[in-house]
Amino acid sequence: MSSNLLSYVGWTFLPNLVTGWIQSLYYGITIRAGDPKPQPGTPKYLKHRRRINIGVIVIYLLYTIYEADYWVRVNGDFYQDLDVAVDADEKRIKSRAAIYHPDKAGSPDGHGNAETYFVRLKSAQDTLTDSTKRFAYERWGPDVLNWQHVSSVRDYIMVGLQSSGPLYGGSIVVMIFLSLVGYLQWGRYWRYLVFGSLALVEYHTLTRPYWSPLLSKVLNPLLTTWTSHPPLLPFQFLALAHKTIFTFFIAMGQLQPFFAPATPTASSSSSAFDEQQLQRLEQLAQATEVETGRLLSLEMAPLVGDEAGQSDMKGKVREWLVQNTIRADPEVRDAIGRAMQRRRVGAPAGAR
């Protein structure tokens, strides 16, 4: 848990910090002294920062996975302590433990602590020569040595699954909560698919009497054939899988701004709404104009062919518009008042 917390703290600031350093160094190398550098906020600056940030996140993701694997190798396992293969039989395991008996040889670390080293090898021998404890050790690691009231494979499986339950239950609750509040939207389907696949692989690995084919037929043959990496035990494989998935989810959150489709902003939504309103108003104005023309033609129907009557009607309509619409407008009335006041300035007494 503390390792995951430290990893999360590192992810919160290290990628952006390193990106700023690399971008400054890149400009210092590629741009000659005196030439203008891309300024923050410009398209060129943002393009460079985007590419550098993606590269930093991917490299940091790989480094985090490598670091997790490094500590797995440093901590070792009982098979490496005894220097036997993972499929070694009971006779081979006991013979290797006897070699380092304190009465026969010193500890291989050269520090003269042979007795302590033999105690550790004795613990490894007792665990690996007991088929039930060996089953449990390979799947849950050295923690099983501290488990109480377990004697059968079923007991170990039940205790082990109960220890894994809070991890998956808590992770599901956190993922659902973050999705509801607006985070983890990009790649949400793939997050749940990967998380569910991990749970299925772990359940299969912990409950079957044989090792997972993914580990025994794919991963370990690749490691032992192409590298000097020792074969992984199931509990080491699951620890690396947890770390990899956890780090991958964080990296997806860091990469989301670069690959997630842009969500419409409030201003763009408001502009689209205004455009729709204008289109509706234009359609309404056109319909009103058509209806007004139709009503006017109906009112003028009795005067069809009477030029004098039509002229008189148009004159009265024009006069009505001037008197009741134009002159009634407050601005027009104010303008007329100011004009009349200017005309009266300097006029003789009694003039209107």
Image (cartoon, rainbow, N blue to C red):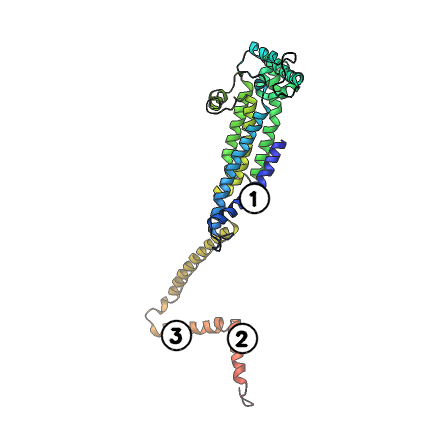
Q: Secondary structure at mark 3?
A: helix
Q: Residue at x 52, y 28 (%)?
A: 196
User: From the viewer's perspective, is the residue at label 2 or at label 3 nearer?
Assistant: 2
Label for residue 334? Answer: 2
Badge number at residue 17: 1
Quadrant position of the N terminus in the picture: top right
Q: Identify which residue, 127 or 310, lies in the foreground.
A: 127
Q: Secondary structure at mark 2?
A: helix
Q: Amino acid at mark 2?
A: Asp
User: N-terminal of the two: label 1 or label 3?
Assistant: 1
Q: Is residue 313 above or below residue 13?
A: below
Query: Which badge, 2 or 3, is on the more N-terminal residue?
Result: 3
Residues at badges 2 and 1 in contact (C-beta under 8 Å)?
no
User: Separation of disc 2 and disc 3 at Cα?
Assistant: 30 Å
Q: Amino acid at mark 1?
A: Leu
Percent x, y of residue 45: 48, 50
Picture quadrant where residue 249 is located: top right
Q: Which residue is identified by label 3?
A: 312
Q: CA distance from mark 1 to mark 3?
A: 84 Å
Looking at the image, can residue 152 be seen?
A: no
Furthest-top residue in this view = 91
**Residue 2 is drawn in which quadrant?**
top right
89 or 188, which is in the foreground?
A: 89
**Amino acid on which the number 3 mark rests in the picture:** Asp
In this rendering, which labeled residue sits more in front, label 1 or label 3? 1
Q: Is residue 305 above or below residue 78?
A: below
